[in-house]
Amino acid sequence: MQNNNIELACGLIGIGRVWGVKEAPVPSEQDALAFLDAALAQSIGYYDTAPSYGSSEVRLGKWLKTLTGEQRTGITIATKFGEHWSEGDQKPYVDHSFEALRMSLDQSLARLGNIDILQLHKTNPAVLKSDDLKRAWEYAKERGVETIGVSVSDLESGEMACEDDQYSLIQLPINQQNTTFAPIIQEATKRGKRIVTNRPFNMGETVNGNETKSKAELEHEAFDFILRQFFNGFILTGTKSPAHLEENMTAFMAAKNSI
Protein backbone atom coordinates (compact mmCIF):
# COMPACT_ATOMS: atom_id res chain seq x y z
CA MET A 1 0.00 0.00 0.00
CA GLN A 2 1.41 3.41 -0.96
CA ASN A 3 1.93 6.12 1.60
CA ASN A 4 -0.02 9.32 1.12
CA ASN A 5 -0.43 10.87 4.55
CA ILE A 6 0.36 14.38 3.31
CA GLU A 7 -0.89 17.68 4.67
CA LEU A 8 -0.58 21.26 3.51
CA ALA A 9 1.74 23.34 5.68
CA CYS A 10 3.13 26.88 5.88
CA GLY A 11 6.67 27.84 5.02
CA LEU A 12 7.13 31.20 6.71
CA ILE A 13 9.97 32.80 4.79
CA GLY A 14 7.51 35.27 3.23
CA ILE A 15 6.47 36.83 6.55
CA GLY A 16 10.08 37.65 7.38
CA ARG A 17 11.98 38.64 4.25
CA VAL A 18 11.61 39.35 0.55
CA TRP A 19 11.44 36.08 -1.36
CA GLY A 20 10.10 34.55 -4.57
CA VAL A 21 10.08 35.38 -8.24
CA LYS A 22 8.09 38.59 -7.77
CA GLU A 23 9.99 39.65 -4.63
CA ALA A 24 6.86 40.99 -2.98
CA PRO A 25 7.39 43.22 0.06
CA VAL A 26 7.36 41.77 3.55
CA PRO A 27 4.00 42.24 5.31
CA SER A 28 3.69 44.36 8.41
CA GLU A 29 3.88 42.55 11.72
CA GLN A 30 0.14 43.03 12.19
CA ASP A 31 -0.57 41.46 8.79
CA ALA A 32 1.87 38.63 9.48
CA LEU A 33 0.14 37.77 12.74
CA ALA A 34 -3.26 37.96 11.02
CA PHE A 35 -1.97 35.55 8.38
CA LEU A 36 -0.93 33.06 11.07
CA ASP A 37 -4.38 33.34 12.65
CA ALA A 38 -5.90 32.60 9.25
CA ALA A 39 -3.60 29.61 8.78
CA LEU A 40 -4.67 28.16 12.11
CA ALA A 41 -8.32 28.72 11.16
CA GLN A 42 -7.59 26.76 7.96
CA SER A 43 -6.39 23.88 10.19
CA ILE A 44 -2.75 24.27 9.18
CA GLY A 45 -0.81 22.22 11.71
CA TYR A 46 2.83 22.59 10.59
CA TYR A 47 4.82 25.83 10.49
CA ASP A 48 8.35 25.97 9.07
CA THR A 49 10.68 28.87 9.81
CA ALA A 50 14.41 29.60 10.14
CA PRO A 51 16.73 32.26 11.57
CA SER A 52 17.73 33.23 8.01
CA TYR A 53 14.13 34.12 7.20
CA GLY A 54 14.60 37.63 8.53
CA SER A 55 11.92 38.51 11.10
CA SER A 56 10.00 35.25 10.60
CA GLU A 57 11.04 33.54 13.84
CA VAL A 58 10.41 36.65 15.91
CA ARG A 59 6.93 37.10 14.46
CA LEU A 60 6.08 33.43 14.81
CA GLY A 61 7.21 33.53 18.44
CA LYS A 62 4.94 36.50 19.17
CA TRP A 63 2.03 34.68 17.59
CA LEU A 64 2.71 31.50 19.57
CA LYS A 65 2.34 33.47 22.80
CA THR A 66 -1.25 34.28 21.83
CA LEU A 67 -2.24 30.61 21.57
CA THR A 68 -3.86 28.51 24.25
CA GLY A 69 -1.98 25.50 25.55
CA GLU A 70 -4.30 23.24 23.59
CA GLN A 71 -3.72 25.18 20.38
CA ARG A 72 0.06 25.06 20.80
CA THR A 73 0.00 21.34 21.51
CA GLY A 74 -1.97 20.76 18.33
CA ILE A 75 0.62 22.29 15.97
CA THR A 76 4.22 21.54 15.02
CA ILE A 77 6.90 24.23 14.93
CA ALA A 78 9.97 23.46 12.84
CA THR A 79 13.01 25.68 12.55
CA LYS A 80 16.61 25.29 11.43
CA PHE A 81 20.20 26.19 12.17
CA GLY A 82 23.19 26.62 9.89
CA GLU A 83 22.06 29.61 7.85
CA HIS A 84 21.83 32.87 9.75
CA TRP A 85 20.56 36.40 9.18
CA SER A 86 22.70 39.52 9.14
CA GLU A 87 20.64 42.46 10.36
CA GLY A 88 23.25 44.90 9.12
CA ASP A 89 23.41 43.54 5.59
CA GLN A 90 19.82 42.27 5.52
CA LYS A 91 21.15 39.08 3.97
CA PRO A 92 21.55 35.44 5.02
CA TYR A 93 24.94 33.85 5.55
CA VAL A 94 26.10 30.31 6.30
CA ASP A 95 28.12 29.21 9.35
CA HIS A 96 28.14 25.56 10.45
CA SER A 97 30.66 25.91 13.28
CA PHE A 98 29.57 24.52 16.63
CA GLU A 99 29.49 27.95 18.28
CA ALA A 100 27.36 29.40 15.51
CA LEU A 101 24.96 26.46 15.65
CA ARG A 102 24.76 26.61 19.45
CA MET A 103 24.09 30.34 19.50
CA SER A 104 21.51 30.00 16.73
CA LEU A 105 19.63 27.31 18.61
CA ASP A 106 19.67 29.32 21.84
CA GLN A 107 18.28 32.31 19.98
CA SER A 108 15.55 30.24 18.30
CA LEU A 109 14.49 28.75 21.63
CA ALA A 110 14.32 32.23 23.15
CA ARG A 111 12.11 33.37 20.28
CA LEU A 112 9.89 30.31 19.90
CA GLY A 113 9.78 28.88 23.40
CA ASN A 114 9.82 25.30 22.20
CA ILE A 115 11.04 23.65 19.02
CA ASP A 116 9.32 20.49 17.85
CA ILE A 117 11.65 19.83 14.91
CA LEU A 118 15.16 21.19 14.30
CA GLN A 119 16.69 20.87 10.85
CA LEU A 120 20.18 21.49 9.53
CA HIS A 121 20.00 24.34 7.03
CA LYS A 122 22.20 24.59 3.90
CA THR A 123 23.20 20.98 4.36
CA ASN A 124 26.20 19.57 2.55
CA PRO A 125 28.09 16.27 2.81
CA ALA A 126 31.11 17.73 4.62
CA VAL A 127 28.94 19.29 7.33
CA LEU A 128 26.99 16.06 7.82
CA LYS A 129 30.30 14.33 8.61
CA SER A 130 31.63 17.10 10.86
CA ASP A 131 32.34 16.88 14.57
CA ASP A 132 30.88 20.35 15.02
CA LEU A 133 27.50 19.15 13.81
CA LYS A 134 27.67 16.07 16.02
CA ARG A 135 28.31 18.32 19.02
CA ALA A 136 25.47 20.62 17.95
CA TRP A 137 22.99 17.75 17.79
CA GLU A 138 24.09 16.63 21.24
CA TYR A 139 23.58 20.16 22.51
CA ALA A 140 20.15 20.33 20.90
CA LYS A 141 19.17 17.13 22.72
CA GLU A 142 20.34 18.66 25.99
CA ARG A 143 18.12 21.67 25.27
CA GLY A 144 15.07 19.43 24.81
CA VAL A 145 14.93 19.05 21.02
CA GLU A 146 13.69 15.53 20.34
CA THR A 147 13.25 15.43 16.56
CA ILE A 148 15.95 16.39 14.08
CA GLY A 149 16.18 16.47 10.32
CA VAL A 150 17.90 18.09 7.38
CA SER A 151 16.94 20.48 4.61
CA VAL A 152 18.81 19.35 1.50
CA SER A 153 19.58 20.80 -1.91
CA ASP A 154 22.01 18.19 -3.25
CA LEU A 155 21.54 14.47 -3.86
CA GLU A 156 24.55 13.27 -1.86
CA SER A 157 23.28 15.00 1.28
CA GLY A 158 19.84 13.50 0.67
CA GLU A 159 21.32 10.04 0.34
CA MET A 160 23.38 10.47 3.51
CA ALA A 161 20.33 11.66 5.44
CA CYS A 162 18.36 8.66 4.22
CA GLU A 163 21.00 6.30 5.57
CA ASP A 164 21.40 8.06 8.93
CA ASP A 165 18.84 6.81 11.44
CA GLN A 166 19.09 9.90 13.64
CA TYR A 167 17.27 11.94 11.00
CA SER A 168 13.55 11.32 10.98
CA LEU A 169 12.67 14.10 8.52
CA ILE A 170 14.09 15.38 5.24
CA GLN A 171 13.05 18.66 3.64
CA LEU A 172 13.64 19.04 -0.08
CA PRO A 173 12.32 20.77 -3.20
CA ILE A 174 10.15 18.98 -5.72
CA ASN A 175 7.75 20.24 -8.35
CA GLN A 176 6.82 19.66 -11.97
CA GLN A 177 9.98 21.45 -13.12
CA ASN A 178 12.34 19.83 -10.61
CA THR A 179 12.16 16.08 -10.00
CA THR A 180 15.78 15.68 -8.85
CA PHE A 181 14.84 14.44 -5.41
CA ALA A 182 12.14 11.93 -6.36
CA PRO A 183 14.49 8.98 -5.59
CA ILE A 184 15.26 10.46 -2.17
CA ILE A 185 11.54 10.68 -1.40
CA GLN A 186 11.10 7.03 -2.31
CA GLU A 187 14.08 5.81 -0.29
CA ALA A 188 13.34 7.96 2.74
CA THR A 189 9.73 6.79 2.76
CA LYS A 190 10.85 3.16 2.66
CA ARG A 191 12.97 3.87 5.71
CA GLY A 192 10.04 5.39 7.61
CA LYS A 193 11.16 9.00 7.43
CA ARG A 194 8.84 11.94 6.91
CA ILE A 195 9.25 14.26 3.95
CA VAL A 196 8.65 18.00 3.84
CA THR A 197 8.55 19.36 0.30
CA ASN A 198 9.13 23.00 -0.54
CA ARG A 199 8.71 25.16 -3.65
CA PRO A 200 5.58 23.37 -4.92
CA PHE A 201 5.03 26.18 -7.46
CA ASN A 202 8.75 26.58 -8.28
CA MET A 203 8.87 29.94 -6.46
CA GLY A 204 5.73 31.07 -8.29
CA GLU A 205 6.83 30.29 -11.82
CA THR A 206 4.42 27.35 -12.17
CA VAL A 207 1.26 29.34 -11.54
CA ASN A 208 2.11 32.65 -13.22
CA GLY A 209 2.06 33.64 -16.86
CA ASN A 210 0.10 30.72 -18.31
CA GLU A 211 -2.44 31.95 -20.86
CA THR A 212 -4.27 28.66 -21.40
CA LYS A 213 -5.04 27.55 -17.83
CA SER A 214 -6.41 29.29 -14.77
CA LYS A 215 -4.33 29.73 -11.65
CA ALA A 216 -6.63 27.31 -9.81
CA GLU A 217 -6.02 24.64 -12.45
CA LEU A 218 -2.28 25.15 -12.29
CA GLU A 219 -2.24 24.92 -8.50
CA HIS A 220 -4.33 21.74 -8.63
CA GLU A 221 -1.91 20.18 -11.12
CA ALA A 222 1.09 21.21 -9.04
CA PHE A 223 -0.30 19.63 -5.87
CA ASP A 224 -1.46 16.54 -7.76
CA PHE A 225 2.08 15.98 -9.05
CA ILE A 226 3.59 16.15 -5.56
CA LEU A 227 0.87 14.05 -3.93
CA ARG A 228 1.56 11.30 -6.47
CA GLN A 229 5.08 10.94 -5.07
CA PHE A 230 3.35 9.09 -2.19
CA PHE A 231 5.06 9.89 1.10
CA ASN A 232 4.25 10.80 4.68
CA GLY A 233 4.70 14.46 5.55
CA PHE A 234 3.91 17.96 4.39
CA ILE A 235 3.87 20.27 1.39
CA LEU A 236 4.99 23.77 2.30
CA THR A 237 3.26 26.71 0.70
CA GLY A 238 5.20 29.94 0.98
CA THR A 239 2.27 32.31 0.74
CA LYS A 240 1.74 35.12 3.24
CA SER A 241 -1.78 36.00 2.07
CA PRO A 242 -4.85 34.57 3.84
CA ALA A 243 -6.81 34.64 0.58
CA HIS A 244 -4.03 32.88 -1.32
CA LEU A 245 -3.71 30.30 1.45
CA GLU A 246 -7.42 29.57 1.13
CA GLU A 247 -6.94 29.12 -2.63
CA ASN A 248 -4.02 26.80 -1.98
CA MET A 249 -6.03 24.74 0.50
CA THR A 250 -8.93 24.40 -1.95
CA ALA A 251 -6.60 23.25 -4.72
CA PHE A 252 -4.69 20.94 -2.38
CA MET A 253 -7.83 19.24 -1.03
CA ALA A 254 -9.25 18.83 -4.54
CA ALA A 255 -6.04 17.19 -5.69
CA LYS A 256 -5.83 14.99 -2.60
CA ASN A 257 -9.43 13.84 -2.91
CA SER A 258 -8.91 12.93 -6.57
CA ILE A 259 -6.14 10.43 -5.85
Image: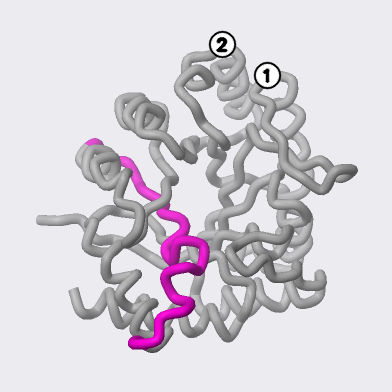
Q: Amino acid at mark 2?
A: Asp
At label 2, counting other C-alpha atoms closer than 10 Å, the crowd grade (few under 14, some 14-19, many 20 or more) is: few
Task: Residue under label 2, please give it.
Answer: 131
What's the residue type where badge 1 is placed?
Answer: Phe
Q: Are marks 1 and 2 in contact (CB under 8 Å)?
A: yes
130 vs 179, left or right, is right
Count of labels shown?
A: 2
Whether residue 199 is in magenta: the answer is: yes
Q: Earlier in the sequence, mark 1 or mark 2?
A: 1
- What residue do we see at 39% from left, 37% from top? 168
Left or right: residue 256 versus residue 137 is: left
Q: Which residues are magenta?
A: 191-213
Give x and y (percent) for residue 34: 71, 78
The answer to whether residue 240 is visible is yes
Mark 1–mark 2 Cα distance, whole angstroms, equals 8 Å
| Residue at (29, 40) in percent of width and height | 184
